[in-house]
Amino acid sequence: MALSIAVRRAEITDTPLLVIALPPDSQVPAALTGLDTALAGALDRTLRRKDFRGSRDEALHLSGGASGPQRVLLVGLGKGDRVMALRRAASLAGRRAHGMGVGSLTFFAGALGEREVEQIAIGLQLGCWEYTDLKTQPPEEDRRAPLSSVTILLGDPQLPIADAERAVNAARAIGSGYDIARRASMMPGNLCTPDYLADTAREIGQRHGLEVVVLGRKEMEALNMGSFLCVAQGTTQDPKLIVLRYRGSVETEKPIALVGKGLCFDSGGISIKPAQGMEFMKFDMCGAAGVLGAMEAIAALKLKLNVVGLIGATTNMPSGVAVKPGDVVKAASGKSIEVINTDAEGRLVLADVLTYAKRYEPAAMVDAATLTGAVVIALGHAATGVFGTSPDLVNELLAAGERSAERGWAMPLWEEYQEQIKSDVADLKNTGGRPAGAITAAKFLEAFAEGVPWVHLDIAGTAYSESDLTVIPKGPTGVPVGMFIEFARARAR
């Protein structure tokens, strides 16, 4: 998408669609009186009659005049934080415009700050995103033009052009990160394989000059990664441990490590999942997609810090050689693990990836994984579960979630929960039963993150949606791309 900014009056803006974002109970803004005159008072009548009230996700389409905007779309901001409201309204506008086939739009929301411009531009990119790679296109005469060009009008008082351009450039980089993550997440499991994730990492590395290392089954066997490899032993696909290194600061500065679970498909293995809804398990690699998207954006933003992104990618399949309930495996750290449930596989993969991440001596580690259904029971789809050994680091991630519209909620990691994952035959077992399932999964990971400040993001309820979300369609949301990026941006400052 081409993103640009402009300073001009709305009534003389020649655009297929003018989007006007308004808060509740608005009157016609002074900057739009000329447009209202050109529309024969349609804006004033609409607002006075309360045909449009400015509620969240409210939209009303009006026809344009003889000149200027051809169409006008009013979108509501609702109540609450204006910055995040603008982002959401922009997402809705982008989706509506994309569906209308207007090709381009102009967005007006009055006077804007730098962060507001950035969030509007991000929202527009998120809203118009669509995965059409595998669909047969309609005849050319029936096709609607995709939304490919957006102009954001700077209101009065005007934000300095240099600041606005900086915001648009940042939004463009972040949008590219979301695009990579959502595309990989939406791809079916027969196409988005461990090899595909590795190739995507190499493309990002080549584009931005990052060091990329990819380990396969043989290399992981040499490193005694029995926990990761037991998940992969039931599939013929070669598992991959993928590492991307971004060096934006001096070599002596310790990096932050971003770790992602990359189960390209999760059948549950021998502890097989129910058939209904199993197709959504192609989304079990959203943590890995988040790492790829974040690394793309971090590199494009040229943030002044060091970051290492790590992904554990495989599939979890039942077969005659698959790991079985009751088997005991040994992780690279030396800890033995009793496999109680083969469907608790993500933590087995992450155990060895977290151990491997320590060789980079990170200042902090943050992992993201669609790890448990239990976190969905606890928090629904509104918040990511945030667990950590460092309260300060937990607070950093929560703040990053607020800034990126990817909210999280802190969860306990009390020692009492450790009792549930004690094994009779090994150091640990990979599940502690139904009670506090999201917490015991995090406690399992904690055993492999010891010695480094660490946070675990359980994104099972937020990384994708099985229903339409109004501002974006069902499918991948892009979580945790934004949280990762905002965490890195804050550290870079």
Image: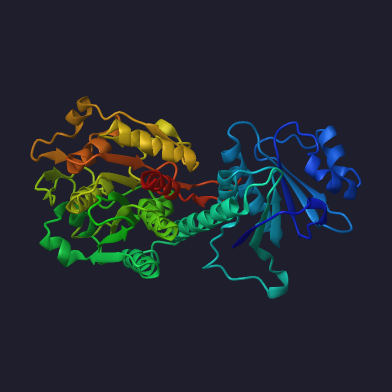
Q: Answer with left or right where residue 133 lies relative to residue 216.
A: right
Q: Is residue 434 visible?
A: no
Q: Answer with left or right where residue 272 lies relative to residue 180.
A: left
When the figure is inspected, residue 263 is found, relative to residue 119, above or below; the finding is below
When the figure is inspected, residue 443 is found, relative to residue 186, above or below; the finding is above
Q: Which residue sits furthest right?
A: 40
In this rendered view, identify the residue nearer to me: 197 or 359.
359
* The C terminus sits in image quarter: top left
Q: Answer with left or right where residue 134 lies relative to residue 438.
A: right
Q: Is residue 284 visible?
A: yes
Residue 320, image x and y in percent?
20, 60
- Quadrant in which residue 435 is drawn: top left
Q: Which residue sits furthest bottom?
A: 140
Residue 257, image x and y in percent?
28, 50
Q: Answer with left or right where residue 178 lies relative to residue 275.
A: right
In this rendered view, identify the residue nearer to me: 81 or 88.
81
Residue 19, image x and y in percent?
72, 50
